[in-house]
Amino acid sequence: MCVYASSKGAINRLAKNLAYEWAKDNIRVNCVAPGVVDTRLLNVLDDKQRAQVIDETPLRRIGKPEEISSVVAFLCMPAASFITGQTLFVDGGFTL
């Protein structure tokens, strides 16, 4: 778990550093940090584990893939042109 957490922190820091360095070239860098999303990877969870994840998520549900892709699409749009160096947590409030 330590290696996983460290690598996530490193990616977020890298995004901030790249955003700062590349801003002069009008290049934006952001991260999207999805929470638990309903994909085939969740098939390893039994009903009790799935219920626990839902219970620990403030929005009380598991995310949908299209909710993650919508955030990525937004970041590519002109409406997001003033966003850089950020990590957007799309996790139903799990990291609150």
Image (cartoon, rainbow, N blue to C red):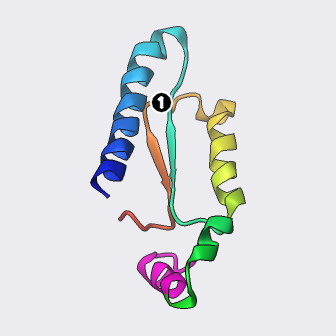
Q: Quadrant of residue 85?
A: top left
- Find the residue positioned furthest to the left: 2
Judge left or right: residue 78 versus residue 27: right
The residue lying at 31 percent from left, 49 percent from top is 3
**Residue type beneath disc 1:** Thr
Query: Which range of residues does the magenta coloring cover?
Result: 49-61
Q: Residue at x 49, y 40 (%)?
A: 31
- Examine the structure image and report whether residue 48 is included in the region drawn in magenta: no
SS majority, magenta? helix
Residue 50 located within the stretch drawn in magenta: yes
52, above or below 57, in the image: below
Residue 58 picture location, percent across and down: 45, 76
Residue 49 visible within the image: yes
Q: Report the front residue among 26 and 13.
A: 13
Q: Is residue 66 above or below residue 14?
A: below
Mark 1 is surrounded, within 10 Å at the Cα level, by few (under 14), some (14 to 19) or many (20 or more) other residues, namely many
* Residue 59, image x, y percentages: 51, 76
Considering the numbered disc 1 on the image, is that residue within a helix, a strand or a loop? Answer: loop
Q: Is residue 39 visible?
A: no
Q: How many marks?
A: 1
Residue at the farthest top position? 25
Task: Give the x, y percent position of residue 36.
Answer: 54, 66
- Above or below 26: residue 10: below
Quarter of the N terminus within the rendering: bottom left
Q: Could you say where residue 92 lies in the image, as x and y percent from the top left?
A: 51, 67
Q: Which residue is mark 1?
A: 84
* Image quarter of the C terminus: bottom left
In the shown orientation, is residue 18 left or right of residue 79?
left
